[in-house]
Amino acid sequence: MSKSYTLYIKAFTPETIPMARLAQYMQNLAAMLGHENAVHFQTLKPGSTQLVTTIDHEDVPKVANHLAQVKRGEGSPDATKAQAEIDRLLAEDNATGFVYEDEDESAEIIAFPGVTRPKPRSYGPFNQEGSLDGILISVSGADQTVHLQLQNGEIKYTGIDTNRETARRLAKHMYEPVRIFGTGRWLRDPKGNWILKKFRVDSYTVLAADDLKDAIDQMRDIEGSEWKNMDDPISALKALREKGNGLH
């Protein structure tokens, strides 16, 4: 005997749901159920959108076990990703949903909070003492506050300020790896990324010569960088420092 699983989408109707959106739900539902060759589209029930599938008889135990693992948070990476994607789609559609078994809507297996899921929060901004590493690539400014930029791999730190005296000494180390110390103002966005709003430099240290090669490797890893084509990048760095030993 075959079994059916239905994704109940509390939005749209079979007549109003866009075809492309329906295809997204179908693709992710199939991935979440697993054993995709055994999962077949059956129909769309009237009312709110209800996407009904049927499972081949011989694969019913496998799919049931697979869904139980997903519900426990132990599903495969593909199934877990599909589960999260269905929830994201529902949130975008200002809806919630759930998967139920056979014809019994009360036999809910997996719930999707969708739009009701608590929204991630931003934290900050707040000040914290710390340090930043990178290659000094810019020193500029005509007033008492001088602005710096550091490059660390693909990350470029901007919004860095210091006084003229510190900037004058730092400028001698243009295109060298340095570590700056001071107070940063940080913000954590809803995705958990830390964003540097500004950084006030109190002091610095030039990193060891051994770190220079690592710093150059970081510059070479940047897409479109000219450093990867240089035969002698260390000599090029020295030439740049000698040519631009002042403020820029």
Image: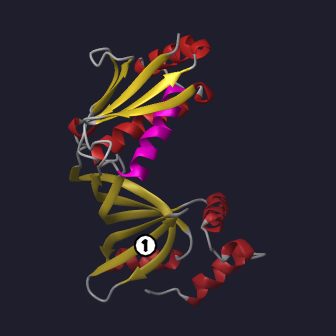
Query: What type is the residue that disc 1 sits on?
Result: Gln
Instruction: Locate residue 35: give its quadrant.
Output: top right
Q: Main secondary structure of the magenta part?
A: helix
Residue 85 x/y as whole percent: 41, 40
Residue 3 visible within the image: yes
Asked if residue 45 lies in the magenta stretch, the reply is no
- 90 and 217: which is toward the camera: 90
Number of marks present in the image shown: 1
Q: Which residues are the magenta region?
A: 18-34
**Residue 21 on the magenta span:** yes
Indicate the quadrant containing the C terminus: top left, top right, bottom left or bottom right: bottom left
The figure's colour scheme reads secondary structure
Q: Which of these two is toward me, 86 or 3?
A: 3
Q: Please state if 222 lies on the left or on the right of 112 as rendered.
A: right
Q: Is residue 178 visible?
A: no
Of residues 132 and 228, the one nearer the viewer is: 228
Examine the image and state in which quarter residue 184 appears. bottom left
Horizontal and vertical percent for residue 200?
30, 65
Q: Residue at x 23, y 49 (%)?
A: 122
The local crowd at label 1, few if under 14, some if 14 to 19, many if 20 or more residues have their Cα within 10 Å, is some
Question: For the view shown, which residue lies furthest in the right direction?
Answer: 231
The residue lying at 35 percent from left, 77 percent from top is: 147
Q: Image point 28% across, 55% down: which residue?
A: 186
Please say if 214 is above or below 150. Answer: above
Give the residue number, with chain letter if any, for mark 1: 149
Placement of 151 over or under 117, stated as above or below: below
* Relative horizontal placement of residue 73, taking residue 90 as reference (left or right): right
Residue 133 percent location from the top left of the image: 48, 59
> Measuring 45% from the left and 15% from the top, which residue is drawn there?
68
